[in-house]
Amino acid sequence: MSVQIAIFARAPVPGAAKTRLIPLLGAEGAAKLHEKLVLHAIANARAADVGPVTLWCAPDSSHPFFAQTGTALADQQGVDLGTRMLHAFEAARGPLLLIGADCPSINAQDLRWCARALEEGEPALFLPAEDGGYGLVGLARSVPQIFSDMQWGVADVMAKTRARLLQANIPWLEGRMIWDVDRPDDYARLMRERLLVG
């Protein structure tokens, strides 16, 4: 069985990418960092070698950077993050791992572990994030109820997702805790841990 990987990424537009890092890096610097994060995510997805990799682009795939990645492209579709993720799972029509481009702590080994779990019959799995959300969701098939009417970007996203899975009687696995890059403290950690090359 092949497990697809979807990477969600916004266009690296200065002033609109990594906005909470603009005071530290400037608009251009934050956009450049975002490009590096996207390329890092793509490299790890390819290194995992579990199935096709698609870059899901927002607001669409027209930004020149996306074409330069040499990755299959798709446009994110939906009014919020939940509907956009649900659309990606419905388009996959099979097992899919979905990650954000801003989680450099997710490596190829993590992706292989998650893919193997889906291959072995797990219906759902997550890599929970330190901020209370998650950086990876993997599903054997679409589960609409975990994406609808969710307030995203808050500290109880993973907790609410667990509650919804329990209510739907859907078992799930959780892997190791990961972290993403949004704030100056995250950037300092990224530099300390030297996760990005170049």
Image: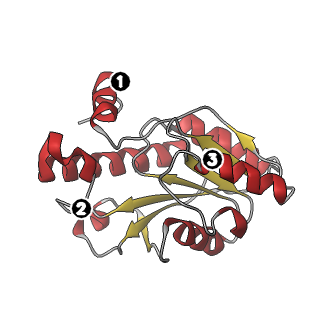
N-terminal label among 3 and 1: 3
Instruction: Write the residue at 55% across / 60% down.
Output: 52
Q: Visible in this render: residue 142?
A: no
Q: Nearer the viewer, mark 2 or mark 1?
A: 2
Q: The N terminus lies in which quarter of the figure?
A: bottom right
Q: Judging from the image, what secondary structure is the residue with disc 1 in?
A: helix
Is 137 rendered above or below residue 85?
above
**Amino acid type, residue under disc 3 in the picture:** Met
Mark 3 crowd level (few <14, some 14–19, many ≥20, 10 Å Cα): many
Instruction: Write the residue at 59% across / 43% down.
Output: 111
Residue 183 % position (x, y) = 31, 40
Residue 34 % position (x, y) = 28, 50
**Relative horizontal placement of residue 57, taking residue 123 as reference (left or right):** left
Is 155 rendered above or below residue 194?
below
N-terminal label among 2 and 1: 2
Q: Alpha-carbon distance for marks 3 and 2?
A: 26 Å
Q: Judging from the image, what secondary structure is the residue with disc 2 in?
A: loop
Mark 1 crowd level (few <14, some 14–19, many ≥20, 10 Å Cα): few
Q: What residue is pinned by disc 2?
A: 16
**Relative horizontal placement of residue 60, taking residue 88 as reference (left or right):** left
**Amino acid type, residue under disc 2 in the picture:** Ala
Instruction: Write the residue at 16% across / 44% down.
Output: 23
**Relative horizontal placement of residue 195, taking residue 143 as reference (left or right):** left
Residue 56 % position (x, y) = 45, 66
* Depth check, front residue: 161 or 118: 161
**Amino acid type, residue under disc 1 in the picture:** Glu
